[in-house]
Image (tube, grey):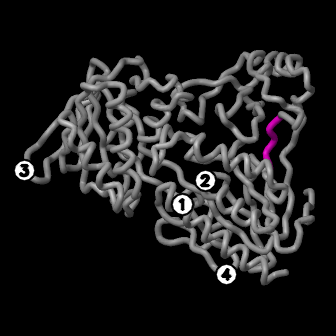
Amino acid sequence: MTDERSAPAGAVLVVGGGISGLTAALEAAEVGKDVFLIEKNPYLGGRVAQLNQYFPKLCPPSCGLEINFQRIRNNRRVRVHTMTEVKSVSGGPGNYQVTLESKPRFVNNNCTACGACADACTDEIDNAFNFGMNKSKAAYKPHDMAFPMKYVIAKDACGDASKQAIKDACKYDAVDFDMQAKEFTLDVSAIVWATGWTPYDATKLENLKVNSSAAIISNMQMERLASPNGPTGGKILRPGDNKEPESFAFVQCAGSRDENHLEYCSYICCMATMKQITYIRSQYPDAKITVFYIDLRTPGKYEKFREKVMADANVTFVKGKVADIIAEADGGVTLVAENAVTGDKVSAKVDLAVLATGMEPNAKGQAAALGLATDGNGFILGDEGMSSCGCAKKAADVVTCTQSSTASAMKAIQASRRSV
């Protein structure tokens, strides 16, 4: 194990490189603190990087992320480690010992992102960034605006001939198939947990039968379909047969507010659906859209946005929980629900159904092993030397995440000053 306890006194560790972790790291670094920013993915940006647009201005990810990437490039106090995870935490406020492991990228810092390795690669993998809706080469750039702008090689997916072709194609000697996982330890004074969220596993929702039809997708898959750098170049098409849908349905609270799944409201799902209706309307002006909901929660300034969407004559809102989704022979699906207002059984046959899956904290399964205190839903609770922010703390939108990240940075700064 490599020991890298060269961190200056009062250094801060930020775990997670999404919008929350970026914000916390930069806030701390720009007041003079040394910061280690780690991210388990090969790129920074988290879930925001996968969105087509985000509130409040309906910006593309490049709008908010690129300026933060530039700030990181210009700030030598931030040291970034991608493909890195926390293995253990010991010590206490002001004096934490954190053991981390970095997985091999199989591409070194000579990489110029020229793409020759991908061109030479003959093997493919599911594209995780697009939630498996298409394939990518096993030598790949994670996405168009990836930071760091370096390729990654899924070595285990490459045959010997493909590996040799990849290595021969790289004229910068950037490919290194002998890279090994690296374990190292840092001494830091404070830790910010910005580990983000993952969409709830819709396969656990047995009545919604997500595996029965390609016409049933999640709200995050819809974001990727609508994104210019997504699997269809931004065209909303039905996975499987690439049909242009003429009708859509949204299933709200897919996993949320359910004692058998996620007990809490995931906060963003109603607004995500309203936003995605605008995606549909921009491409399919006459498409019929049905929204099945329990309650519509669009707090504060988002009320006007909701009112505008609900004024669309081709959008029908049904207060009722979907009990069943039936795959149809033509590739579409029929959703069955009970109208909670009238008591009538209602059904809607559509070309594409979107499940508004809830937000589950990423650290839920790992928190106990690391000795982190969590609430009953797996969100991380802070203490004197450790704090959580963004969706590691609670289900939240981007604005709330950045606000809580600034607060976490302040706590980390205070803790680090006490330790110096």
- Residue tagged 4: 384
x and y, in percent, of residue 301 in the image:
35, 58
Q: Is residue 365 left or right of residue 276?
A: right
Is residue 254 visible to us here? Answer: yes
Is residue 159 visible to us here? Answer: no
Residue 39 got which mark? Answer: none
- Residue tagged 3: 342
Upstream in sequence: badge 1 or badge 3? 3
Upstream in sequence: badge 2 or badge 3? 2
Q: Secondary structure at mark 1?
A: helix
Residue 401 got which mark? Answer: 1
Upstream in sequence: badge 4 or badge 1? 4
x and y, in percent, of residue 33 in the image:
80, 68
Q: Residue at x 86, y 58 (%)?
A: 184
Tell us which disc is closer to us: 2 or 3.
2
In which quadrant is the N terminus drawn?
Answer: bottom right
Amino acid at dot 1 = Cys
Q: Alpha carbon of mark 4 to alpha carbon of mark 1: how far? A: 20 Å
